[in-house]
Amino acid sequence: MGAVFLARQISLDRKVAFKVLAPRFARNANYVRRFFREAQVAAQLRHPNIVTTHDIVVSERSSFIVMELVEGQD
């Protein structure tokens, strides 16, 4: 549904994973709802093997999730 990028959260001076909803899905309300729900559910989970969700932004033009960065391979 999207791509994940390495980013820097400037306000806290830390590296984060930045998951962006693909443009072809960003205009579809069902996909945007699913993407938002994914972030909500992930934010409720606490486990050493699950990345922490820091934030989500949903707008008319794009949607993204800011997550804990885990260094290593895919």
Image (cartoon, helix red, strand yellow):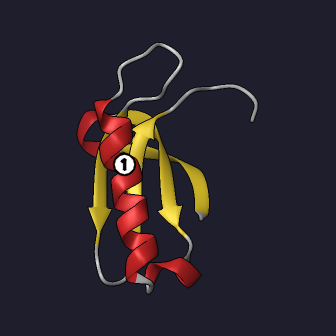
Depicted 9 relative to depicted 3: above or below: above
Quadrant location, the N terminus: bottom right
In this rendering, does residue 62 appear at all? no
Amino acid under disc 1: Ala
Depicted 1 relative to depicted 70: above or below: below
Q: Tell which of 14 and 4 is nearer to you.
A: 4
Relative placement, left or right, of 71 versus 41 is right
The residue labelled by disc 1 is 39
**Residue 23 % position (x, y):** 54, 80
Q: Residue at x 47, y 13 (%)?
A: 48
Depicted 2 relative to depicted 17: above or below: below
Q: Residue at x 50, y 62 (%)?
A: 20
In this rendering, does residue 74 appear at all? yes
Helix, strand or loop for disc 1 = helix
| Residue 42 figure quarter | top left
Depicted 23 relative to depicted 54: above or below: below
Quadrant location, the C terminus: top right
Residue with the most extreme left position = 11
| Residue 53 figure quarter | top left
Relative placement, left or right, of 34 versus 59 is right
**Residue 72 % position (x, y):** 70, 25
Relative placement, left or right, of 6 versus 15 is right
Q: Residue at x 49, y 25 (%)?
A: 50
Badge 1: residue crowd in 10 Å (few <14, some 14–19, many ≥20): many
**Residue 10 % position (x, y):** 31, 44
Q: Residue at x 47, y 28 (%)?
A: 51
Residue with the most extreme right position = 73
